Image (cartoon, rainbow, N blue to C red):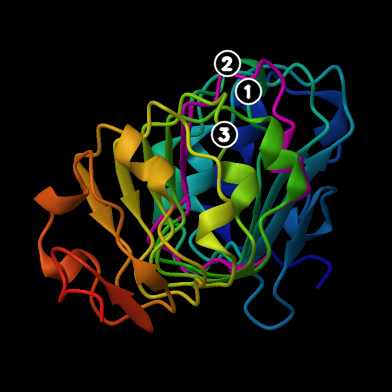
Amino acid sequence: MSGRCNPQDKKVLLKIKKALGNPYLLASWDPKTACCDWYCLECHPDTHRVISLTMFTDDKLTGQIPADVGDLPHLETLLFRHLPNLHGTIPPTVTKLKNLKTLWLPLHTPKLEALYLDRNKLTGSIPESFGRFPGRNLYSFILSHNKLSGTIPASLADMDLNTVDLSRNMLQGDPSVLFGKNKTTFYIDLSRNMFQFDLSKLQFPKSLARLDLNHNKITGSIPARLTELELQFLNVSYNRLCGKIPVGGRLQSFDYSTFFHNRCLCGAPLDGCK
């Protein structure tokens, strides 16, 4: 591989070096040498195109993630880690990297208000670290339409989120850490997963207005506590619920599709209990 280097990749890499202020970390990036010999990157053994760019552990590297990273079309791994003086936003040009398999970027976490990772092909479990963002400013937590599995990390019990959408994944277990009578959550969508828990044991935030739990494996009965909420939307269909639907609040304002396809629910708006 020595002596090989794609001219276009080399041009882009030198732009990245300049944008980062020519840091010592990239001292090997000499335009007179072949870029596949440079530190912090890896080239494909056959095509000699840059496939990996990794920068980490350098407190002297400053600036923003250069937009030029999006001009390395064969990049499979992009990693910026332990770079405390890196700031700014994640460049939109990252979306141009169609071959990207691994992306590791710093979050400017003390001020993080929303996390949108929906409609991808993300696998694995939700990290415990997602419940430990400093600053506790996270407002929206959206991971829907992925292929996530495992259980909800216990650390999320400490987060007071306004909006939670984990729908259309393969998550399991008990998500009760997302609920709590002292939280201020407005919207929770856990639909189309494999959650299995007793609905009657949940403690609901008084602020909860939209709750979607359809297509899971939820057992128990519908708790009377739901009648105390100003619900704008509710769906508990396609579960394993039993018992009489409590009367009161807004529960009878929803049609039968909110409650149907359960094990043995009864009462308005479903058929009467026998």
Q: Which residue is mark 2?
A: 111
Q: Which residues are magenta?
A: 114-143
Residue displayed at 34% across by 49% down: 211
Task: Provide residue 268's location: percent of width, then percent of height.
Answer: 15, 63
CA separation in Å, label 3 and label 2: 29 Å
CA separation in Å, label 2 and label 1: 7 Å
Q: Give SS at disc 3.
A: helix
The quadrant holding residue 138 is top right
Task: Provide residue 207's location: percent of width, then percent of height.
Answer: 38, 26
Of helix, strand and loop, which mostly describes the magenta segment? Answer: loop
**The disc labelled 1 sits on which kind of residue?**
His
Residue found at the far front of this picture: 274
The tag on residue 108 is 1
Q: Are marks 2 and 1 in contact (CB under 8 Å)?
A: yes
Question: In this rendering, which labeled residue sits more in front, label 2 or label 1?
Answer: 2
Using the image as rendered, state which of residue 115 and residue 66 is in the foreground: 115
Using the image as rendered, state which of residue 90 and residue 51 is in the foreground: 90
Q: Which residue is mark 3?
A: 15
Left or right of 4? Residue 207 is: left
Residue displayed at 72% across by 17% down: 62
Left or right of 22? Residue 204 is: left
Q: Residues within 10 Å of mark 2 (few under 14, many from 20)?
A: few
In this rendering, the answer to whether 185 lies above or below 41 is above
Using the image as rendered, state which of residue 78 and residue 21 is in the foreground: 78
**The disc labelled 2 sits on which kind of residue?**
Lys
Using the image as rendered, state which of residue 44 and residue 124 is in the foreground: 124
The quadrant holding residue 262 is bottom left
Q: Residues within 10 Å of mark 1 (few under 14, many from 20)?
A: some
